[in-house]
Image (cartoon, rainbow, N blue to C red):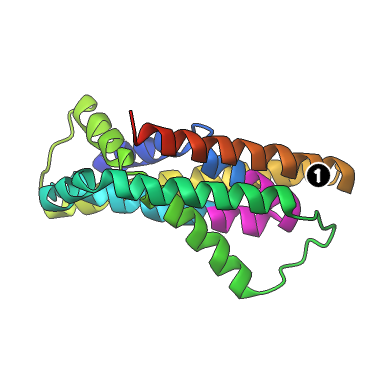
């Protein structure tokens, strides 16, 4: 199995489990269109690639710093999840699927990037998967192919998810989408509360 293919599988497996990023991607796809959902996923894929870099290149200084500061990072991530959850519950569904502005896309990208990057436990997931597959810090060229595979695998998942959800959007009315907003907002708030509680455990 090539290094790139291993990275592709890792990126796909890290991104696929449904969590707060998946909830956000689904909600944004339903409310704003497939492009917003995909760009939201791209923010998470970028953060995954960063953590993949840390694991692949053996950047112990960065990984140690992230773990030492994980409580503060998790605190920020928990608060951001609460904010996103409240915003989701208060948002009003729109039937307009046109992309309103690049600023909205940038916000979608950065918000999921921040949510993913403020989860320092992701680095442990990458280190664990790398160890399980017998991947060690080889040459820089191999590490680059590995990280590229991680990014592409994660990006591919978000492309599948946003397009899959986009297909069923046409069967939903505003009332149903409003309930989806409230439910997804509540889930995000729960994720945020759990993240904050874990700081004290």
**68 relative to 46 in the view: left or right:** left
Residue 104 drawn at (x, y percent): 62, 68
Residue under the point 50% across and 37% down: 193
Q: Main secondary structure of the magenta part?
A: helix
Residue 142 drawn at (x, y percent): 18, 48
Residue 161 drawn at (x, y percent): 61, 42
The residue indicated by pointer 1 is 177
Residue under the point 11% across and 52% down: 61
**85 relative to 56 in the view: left or right:** right
Q: Quadrant of the C terminus?
A: top left
Q: Determine the image quadrant of residue 177.
A: top right
In the image, farthest residue toward the top: 132
Q: Is 34 contained in the magenta span? A: yes
Depth order, front residue of 118/172: 118
Residue under the point 72% across and 72% down: 100
Residue range in magenta is 25-40
Residue neighbourhood size for the residue with mark 1, other residues' Cα within 10 Å, grouped as few (<14), some (14–19), many (≥20): some
Q: Determine the image quadrant of residue 99.
A: bottom right
Depth order, front residue of 65/151: 65
Task: Give the secondary structure at mark 1.
Answer: helix
Q: Quadrant of the N terminus?
A: top left
Residue under the point 73% across and 52% down: 90
Depth order, front residue of 101/67: 67
Q: In this rendering, is residue 41 above or below 15? A: below
In the image, farthest residue toward the front: 200
Residue 35 drawn at (x, y percent): 64, 59
């Amino acid at each position: 199995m090539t290094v790139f293919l291993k990275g592709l599988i890792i990126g796909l497996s890290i991104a696929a489990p449904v969590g707060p990023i998946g909830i956000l991607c689904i909600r944004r796809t339903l409310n704003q269109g497939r492009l917003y959902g995909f760009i939201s996923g791209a923010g998470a894929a970028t953060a995954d690639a960063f953590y993949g870099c840390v694991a692949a290149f053996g950047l112990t200084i960065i990984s140690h710093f992230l773990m030492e500061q994980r409580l503060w990072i998790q605190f920020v991530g928990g608060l951001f999840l609460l904010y996103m959850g409240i915003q989701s519950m208060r948002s009003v569904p729109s039937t307009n699927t046109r992309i309103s502005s690049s600023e909205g896309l940038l916000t979608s990208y950065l918000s999921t990037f921040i949510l993913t990057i403020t989860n320092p436990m992701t680095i442990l997931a990458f280190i664990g998967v790398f160890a399980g597959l017998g991947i060690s810090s080889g040459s820089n060229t191999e590490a680059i192919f590995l990280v590229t595979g991680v990014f592409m695998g994660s990006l591919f998942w978000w492309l599948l998810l946003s397009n899959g959800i986009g297909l069923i959007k046409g069967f939903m009315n505003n009332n149903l989408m409003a309930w989806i907003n409230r439910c997804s907002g509540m889930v995000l708030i729960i994720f945020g509360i759990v993240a904050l509680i874990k700081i004290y455990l």
